[in-house]
Structures are given as C-alpha cells and as structure tokens.
C-alpha cells in the first residue's frame, strides 16, 4: 500500500490508548504486541495499517527472501550463508496481513515434500511469517483464527523464529515481528492462555461526543475524496512523529528501571493475582518504553501505572464470562502502599538539557495532533459486553418478587404443578431471575464422524489429530503418510532402475494421511421461559444448567445460539455466534411468564438450523431443549409440538431434552418430547457432573440404535 493511499496515523481522532499502545511497540518491539478489542467501526484496522509508515526503514541482504540484516545475517537462513557486511539494500518496513482463512502452509511456509523425497532437495516457499520479519504482522479478527494457527503464530512471536517440519525434513528461519491483533468480542473470545501471549491490550469504543464524531466523519470524507492531498496535509505531523519514534528508540537503552519501580511492578501483579511472570516482564518493558517515549532516562510511578493499565486487564480473567478490566482505585492504592514501603524513592532524571515530561501527557506530547478524548471507553457505554443493552425486565405489576420457596402456583405455574394458593394470570411476566451456580458437565457429543471446523466436542476428520489411514492426495500434498508412500513405491524399484540405497519415488506413490480429531459444533439452546417455569428457585436452576453447558461450549470452541419461547411466540434471543459471553448475557436477562408455545420454539429452532446448514454445511448441530414438556396455547398444542419435533427427527438432528419438571406429580412430558425428537432426555439432577458419567454413552447408544433400526 502506498503512503498516499494509507490514512495518516496522526489524523486519527481520539483513541489515545490505542495509538499509545501501538507507538510503544514501535519504540520497543520487546513489549510483545497489541491486542485491540472493540466494537466494529472504531478505527482498529486503520490505526494498525497507518503505523507501518512510522517505522524506520529496514536494511536487508540483496536477494534474501527472509530479510536478513547485512550487519548481522541469520546464520541459519535458508537462503544463506550470507557473507558478513555483504551487499544490501533498504526498503520500507512491511505490514503483512494474515487472512482469517489462511492455511498453515500460507502462514509458516510450504515445504515441497515431493521434491524432498524424489530429489533430496529442500524446496521451501516462505510464508507470511517470513514476509513479516522485521516488520508488522497484522491479524484482523484474530479470535476467528483456528486454534492451531494461533498457536503457531504466538510460538513464532515468542521464539523469534519459525520452524517448519514435514516427515523429518525441517526448515528454520528468523521471524521477529510486531504482532498486532484486532477482534470484536461479540464474535467470540480468545482462550485466556492465548490472551496472555499478547503484550498489551486496549479496549476501544466509538466516542459518544458529537463534536468528535463530526470530526471523524469530516476527516474520513476528505481522505476518500483525495487521499494524496489529505496525506500531504498531514505529512508534517507524520514526519514529526516518525522522528519522535526514532529518538525514543535511541534513548531506550539508556532508560533505567530502578529497584523501586520493579518493586511497584511486582506489588501490582501480586495484588491483582496475575498468573505467572509474563505480566511482570511486560509491565517492566512497557514502563521502560513509556519513559523513553516521554524523553526520560528513569522509569517514574506514572509509567508503572500506565503500564499496568495496558498490560494487565486481559490477564485478570478468572473464567470465560469475566470481562477484561482493572480496578483503577485498587491500582492507585497498591502504588501508594508500595511507595510508602520504598523510602529511597528518587525523582525521575531527564536527559541533560531537557525538562521532564509527563508520560502521556500535556497537549503537545500525545501520539497525534488532535488530542482527542477517545481513550479507554466508559464502562457505562456498554460496548463489547455482548448483552445488546438488554435490561432486566420487571413484572407487569409492581408487586414484590416471589420468595425463593414460593410454590409454583403463585408464580404462574400451570395445573398439575405442586403448591396451592391463588394462581397469577398466565400472561403475567416475572422479573429476570439470576442463574444458579454453574457446575462442570461432561461432554454431549454428536454421534458419527464429522468434517467440521476444528474444536473439542465431536469426532471428525481434521488436519490435526491421530492418523487413521491414508489416501491418494487431491491437489497439493499437505500431510504425508510416509509408511503408505513407501509401500506404494517399493514394488516398482527394480522397474525404475534403482541402483543405490535411496528409494525412487514418483508422484503416483505419494499418499496423504487421513487424521481424526475433534470438531466444534453448533449448540442451539431452546429454552422454555413460560409461566410453568417461573418459580424462582426452579428457573434459577434451569439458568444455572444452561450456563454450565455454555461454559462447556466455550471450552470446546462451539458456536452457540439461543431460542426462547413464552406467551404466544418464540424468538431468536441470540443468532448462532462464537460469542458464548453474549449468550450468557442474554440468558441472565431472560424473563419468564405466559403460556407455553412449545411448537413455536421447535419450529423457530428448525428455521435457525436450516439457515445455518446453508451457511456452513460441515458444522453439525446439537439441539438442547430445556423444558418441562408442557404445551399450551392455540388449538391442539401437544399435537403441533409433536409434529414440530418430528421435523428435527427427520433430519437426524442430534437432540437432548433437559427435563425441568418438578414436584410430586410428574407427567413425563419431556420424555415424550425426547422420543418424538429421537433424542435423549435427562433431568436437571442428572446434568450434575457426578450424574453425567453415562450420559454421553446414552446419547451415542441411542443414535446407534436408531441407525440399526
């Protein structure tokens, strides 16, 4: 991308934390990259792409595909060895983008196994990691990458090298780059251990200030009308910021990280219970970069505080539904306590002839010319919480909520439930009930062998896993089955004129390994929120069970969806998504009350699955119906529910019915529904981990019996 067609970094309005985090990595790549989290349309990609223009040019060995430095060439470079102080050239720092759908070979490079076996040569085609060496590697929507690609990416970032191994043939090359990832949390989270590998994280949200939004639109329209002219107007600011980055890089080795600053860093990480030592190291490097950015040679308290705000929020998550964040009041308290324990605290020392400067501050030393107020979003904005702004709904009357042990008849229960008293009208809506305590569950898997996206739930043919056989390759060979290849080539050695110890291998002999691993599924929850479910203790237990299954779906890399039914209709509370957090938020806000349109819920689920099969035919669904099996409202509600269930059965959708019926009189309607679905019924008590041991076997055996019949 040419400089004139790239939006200038200094023209970005607001987003101060984002710009500062990127600039700190430009000053000190050892910080470890940036993860940018936020809603769509907040200049995440624009800022990252603009950063490349601020990096200093790179000197490379002529003809080297791996961008070796002429002053210190990589001794293990596949294009080497390079002579010391050999001929070199200069090029601009690269910004390489990793597409979400990239293959493993595209990322790390492709090794031609055919030539390696037949000719004995290492024919290696560099991948994106080689292209990004000494530059920026940008991953948009990093949370949508397959896990094995993220593992390869972060391993290379941590080791500074990429290793490609295929059946004993290996290639290594240097891969040191500034890693920047962006993601929208509504589309799914990264695993905590992967979050920890990013040095800094920044939460971004659109400004709520009208004047700032006007300026954003004005500048963007001006850029689109004439990119070259717009870039020219900002060329002075860009040059000034580029010089400041170069000056901070030069000052960085002289910045002193004193014992007092180290004690503060350790105290902060300990107070916030940060796992491991990576947080301490990243904080130390970030504080040093902040001091260099501010033109100081000693790390100050303000540097440690700002480093904590950038380096620790994503390391504070304790379970998948915790939002990243840091309690700033607690942070200030910890820093004060650490200062009280450090009597030898010294003031920062500026370079000779220069006045001290605040780390982020003042009107003249922000990362851009516009100042802006687009830093960390106000928690009150609700950005990125996945809840869609759904407030808890109140009851239609203003009465007090029912007590925990209120009989179900007092909370909208239908005839047949236990309890007495005056029943509330069926149309009454109850306040949303908090979910019960989640618990660990055993896996509910889809029977058979799938071929969907990599995950951890059901058996599937995958690129990674245990080898189960071999086949002739269709297209390029990616995973060689060495034994099968040797067996195919061995009978033809005499006819091919073999005279030495080597094996004469031709393309027709090559065999592709077939592997079996685990896939992620689409887990669609259909939750009964009608009046018959409205007892507080009962609905809390139901929500706790669904929340437990959502936790399991998060860990197994599933997509999830949520359909609810009550009153006269069903609705899709959450379309299928990778964001389990969003599903949990919608579940918490789910009110109850009204009749039980079971058929409508099943038909709505059928529509959702039909659309998802068109979008992704390889992702197999698992239908989880949470209900007591009652069906009321409209003509022949039970018969309609049966016909709707048989639609799912006809398409062989794997189903589990969670029976929520309670009380001394039980009608067994959920079991009847499970039989219509040709699925399995379990009670709430059986969902407990200790009771779920045989559940997977029951589900699998049930489907095997169906196939045998």
Image (spheres, rainbow, N blue to C red):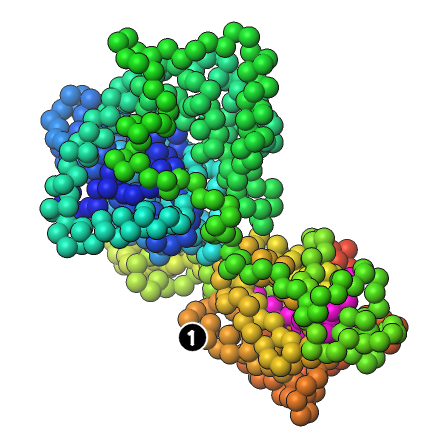
Q: Quadrant of the C terminus?
A: bottom right
Q: Is residue 171 visible?
A: no
Q: Is residue 689 left or right of residue 476?
A: right
Specify start and end residues of the magenta stretch as a single range: 522-537
Q: Quick check: can you spot residue 228?
A: yes
Image location (x, y in percent) of residue 514: 45, 60
In the rendered view, tell whether residue 653 sits above or below residue 165.
Answer: below
Element marked by disc 1: helix
> In the figure, residue 72 lies in which quadrant?
top left
Q: From this view, report whether residue 138 is shown above or below residue 662.
A: above
Q: Nearer the viewer, residue 639 or 483?
A: 639
- The magenta stretch spans residue 242: no
In percent of the image, x 70 and y 84: which residue is there?
A: 632
Task: Determine whether, in the image, residue 606 is placed left or right of residue 73.
Answer: right
State the image coordinates of residue 325 (x, y, percent, origin top left).
52, 40
Circle 1 sits on which residue? Answer: 614
Residue 532 painted magenta: yes
Q: Nearer the viewer, residue 195 or 78?
A: 195
């Amino acid at each position: 991308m040419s400089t004139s067609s790239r939006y200038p970094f200094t023209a970005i309005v607001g987003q101060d934390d984002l710009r500062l985090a990127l600039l700190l990595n430009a000053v000190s790549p050892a910080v470890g990259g940036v993860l940018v989290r936020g809603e769509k349309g907040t200049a995440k990609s624009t800022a990252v792409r603009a950063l490349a223009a601020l990096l200093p040019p790179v000197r490379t060995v002529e003809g080297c595909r791996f961008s070796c430095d002429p002053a210190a060439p990589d001794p293990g470079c596949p294009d080497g060895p390079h002579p010391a102080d050999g001929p070199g050239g200069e090029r601009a720092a690269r910004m390489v983008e990793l597409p979400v759908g990239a293959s493993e070979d595209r990322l790390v490079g492709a090794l031609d196994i055919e030539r390696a076996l037949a000719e004995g040569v290492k024919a290696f085609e560099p991948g994106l990691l080689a292209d990004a060496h000494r530059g920026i590697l940008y991953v948009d929507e990093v949370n949508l990458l397959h896990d094995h690609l993220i593992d390869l990416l972060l391993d290379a970032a941590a080791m500074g090298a990429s290793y490609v191994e295929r059946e004993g043939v290996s290639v290594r090359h240097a891969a040191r780059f500034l890693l920047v990832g962006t993601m929208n949390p509504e589309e799914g989270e990264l695993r905590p251990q992967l979050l920890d590998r990013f040095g800094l994280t920044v939460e971004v949200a659109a400004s709520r200030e009208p004047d700032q939004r006007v300026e954003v639109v004005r500048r963007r329209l001006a850029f689109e009308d004439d990119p070259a002219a717009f870039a020219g107007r900002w060329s002075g600011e860009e040059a000034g910021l580029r010089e400041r980055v170069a000056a901070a890089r030069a000052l960085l080795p002289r910045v002193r990280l004193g014992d007092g600053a180290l004690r503060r860093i350790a105290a902060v990480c300990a107070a916030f219970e940060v796992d491991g030592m990576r947080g301490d190291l990243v904080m130390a490097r970030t504080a040093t970069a902040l001091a260099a950015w501010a033109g100081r040679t000693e790390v100050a308290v303000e540097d440690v505080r700002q480093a904590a705000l950038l380096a620790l929020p994503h390391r504070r998550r304790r379970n998948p539904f915790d939002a990243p964040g840091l309690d700033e009041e607690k942070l200030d308290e910890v820093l004060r306590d650490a200062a009280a324990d450090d009597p030898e605290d010294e003031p920062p020392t500026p370079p000779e002839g220069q006045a001290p400067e605040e780390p982020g501050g003042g009107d003249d030393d922000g990362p851009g010319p516009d100042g802006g107020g687009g830093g960390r979003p106000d928690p009150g904005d609700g950005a990125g919480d996945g809840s869609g702004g759904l407030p808890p709904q109140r009851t239609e009357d203003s009465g007090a909520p029912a007590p925990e042990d209120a009989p179900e008849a007092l909370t909208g229960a239908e005839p047949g439930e236990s309890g007495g008293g005056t029943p509330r009208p069926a149309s009454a809506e109850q306040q949303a009930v908090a979910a019960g305590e989640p618990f660990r569950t055993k896996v509910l898997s889809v029977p058979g062998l799938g071929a969907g996206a990599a995950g951890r739930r059901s058996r599937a043919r995958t690129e990674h896993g245990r080898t189960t056989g071999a086949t002739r390759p269709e297209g390029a060979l990616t995973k060689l089955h060495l034994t099968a290849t040797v067996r195919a080539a061995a009978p033809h050695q005499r006819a091919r004129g073999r005279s030495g110890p080597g094996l004469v291998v031709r393309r027709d002999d090559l065999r592709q390994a077939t592997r079996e691993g685990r896939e992620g599924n689409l887990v669609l929850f259909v939750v009964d929120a009608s009046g018959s479910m409205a007892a507080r203790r009962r609905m809390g237990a139901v929500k706790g069970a669904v929340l437990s299954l959502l936790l399991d779906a998060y860990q197994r890399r599933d997509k999830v969806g949520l359909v609810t039914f009550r009153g006269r209709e069903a609705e899709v509370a959450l379309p299928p998504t990778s964001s389990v957090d969003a599903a949990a938020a919608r579940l918490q806000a789910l009110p109850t009350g009204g009749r039980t349109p079971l058929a409508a819920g099943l038909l709505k689920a059928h529509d959702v699955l039909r659309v998802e099969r068109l979008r992704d035919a390889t992702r197999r669904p698992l239908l989880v119906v949470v209900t007591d099996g009652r069906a009321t409202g409209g003509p022949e509600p039970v018969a309609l529910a049966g016909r709707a269930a048989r639609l799912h059965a006809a398409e062989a959708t794997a189903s589990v019915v969670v029976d929520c019926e309670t009380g001394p009189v039980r009608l067994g309607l959920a079991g009847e529904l499970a039989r219509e679905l040709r699925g399995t019924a379990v009670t709430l008590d059986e969902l407990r981990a200790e009771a779920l041991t045989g559940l997977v076997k029951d589900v699998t055996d049930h489907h095997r019996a169906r196939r045998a019949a």
